[in-house]
């Protein structure tokens, strides 16, 4: 595709996005094809996504066969950050390694990335288009992402089925169940009960259900060298779920992440009280799992200390970037403080 063709397609996509603001979830979930373009991808690269909305015979009830608005925001952020790091390298500064770049949200030729709850796979495909070494695009129902990855032609994009699972220590399984982390989890759950009004908790899994470490093991084995990724990505994966699903998400992230190497980026959109309750569950679970971080309004995100160059998206003012890293032990993350900063 030529550069003028890409520019024309991007202009049409922008018009469609503006027209979609009056639709449910503020994005186009009906068009059979969506596109994403950014200068950082190259003027001749256009990511095309097939989606199957409710007007399609191939529609699957749930979330995986249609686009969600935070995916565009995540793609923009990855592109803006990568462009800034490339500019820094072009000035003759010391080359930025994959872990350092990940800490800024950028992709390098050495980057290994994992997208969780990918749906159509836009975030992962953007990382692949930016030149990552290897991108694992995952979902519990990966058919739509697999189709889009194959159509993209990106040889560095790989799609896998992945179910989020709770950690063994959180489930009371194995030697780790009685550790300090388990005590932190129990205290956090008690506080969560009090603040959220929920009675207890979480449905207990059967013993034969994999733990988070077991679920992550096969994916990690498929990554280059069997090593942990530099980036873990997610968009619209925290919306109106309960505590149990947030524990599964967080514990899966913790199983995939490595302290000092991995940075996690999850784009969250404020859609009302149910979403804030979910975010509360997310941060409570993250504290117990040894993940630490902060939410930042998308419009206030900085790259290398300066505002991003991109123009942003409609409704970005309603979105947060949840940035996390894994620490060696459960962190003392003050959930109420984080929520106060986010509101």
Image (cartoon, helix red, strand yellow):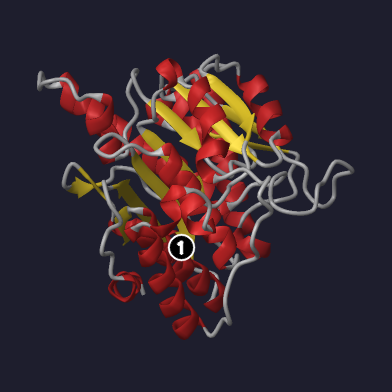
Q: Tell me: residue 34, above or below residue 175.
A: above
Residue depicted at x 53% and y 26%: 6
- Which residue is identified by label 1? 282
* Quadrant for the N terminus in the image: top right
Q: Tell me: residue 131, above or below residue 213.
A: above
Q: Residue furthest right?
A: 57
Residue depicted at x 31% and y 33%: 106
Residue 236 visible at all: no
Q: Residue furthest left?
A: 93
Residue depicted at x 32% and y 60%: 180
Packing grade of label 1 (10 A; few <14, some 14-19, many >=20) is many
What kind of element bears circle 1?
A: helix
Residue 323 placement, left or right of 161: left
Q: Position of residue 74 (x, y in %)?
A: 45, 45
Q: Position of residue 316 (x, y in %)?
A: 43, 58
Of residues 220 and 23, the one drawn nearer to the viewer in this rendering: 220
Of residues 341 and 207, the one drawn nearer to the viewer in this rendering: 207
Residue 326 placement, left or right of 283: left
Q: Tell me: residue 140, above or below residue 111.
A: below
Of residues 214 and 332, the one drawn nearer to the viewer in this rendering: 214
């Amino acid at each position: 595709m030529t550069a003028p063709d890409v520019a024309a397609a991007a202009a049409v996509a922008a018009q469609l996005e503006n027209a979609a603001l009056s639709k449910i979830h503020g994005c186009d979930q009906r068009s059979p094809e969506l596109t994403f373009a950014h200068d950082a991808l190259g003027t001749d690269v256009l990511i095309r996504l097939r989606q199957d909305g409710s007007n399609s015979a191939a529609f699957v009830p749930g979330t995986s066969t249609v686009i969600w608005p935070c995916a565009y925001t995540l793609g923009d952020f990855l592109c803006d950050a990568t462009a800034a790091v490339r500019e820094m390298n072009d000035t003759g500064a010391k080359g930025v390694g994959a872990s350092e770049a990940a800490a800024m949200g950028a992709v390098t030729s050495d980057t290994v990335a994992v997208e969780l709850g990918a749906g159509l796979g836009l975030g992962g495909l953007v990382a692949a288009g930016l030149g990552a070494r290897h991108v694992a695009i995952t979902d519990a129902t990966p058919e739509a992402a697999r189709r889009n990855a194959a159509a993209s032609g990106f040889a560095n994009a790989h799609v896998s089925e992945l179910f989020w699972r709770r950690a063994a220590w959180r489930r009371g399984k194995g030697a780790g169940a009685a550790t300090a982390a388990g005590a932190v989890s129990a205290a956090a759950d008690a506080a969560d009960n009090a603040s959220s009004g929920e009675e207890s908790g979480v449905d207990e899994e059967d013993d034969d259900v994999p733990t988070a470490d077991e679920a992550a093991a096969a994916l990690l084995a498929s990554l280059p060298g069997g090593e942990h990724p530099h980036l873990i990505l997610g968009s619209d994966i925290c919306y109106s779920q309960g505590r149990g699903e947030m524990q599964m998400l967080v514990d899966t992230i913790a199983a995939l992440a490595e302290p000092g190497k991995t940075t996690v980026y999850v784009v969250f959109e404020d859609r009302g009280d149910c979403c804030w309750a979910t975010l509360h569950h997310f941060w409570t679970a993250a504290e117990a799992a040894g993940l630490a971080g902060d939410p930042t309004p998308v419009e206030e995100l900085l790259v290398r200390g300066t505002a991003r160059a991109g123009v942003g998206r409609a409704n970005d003012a309603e979105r947060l970037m949840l940035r996390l890293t894994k620490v060696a032990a459960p962190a003392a993350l003050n959930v109420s403080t984080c929520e106060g900063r986010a509101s």
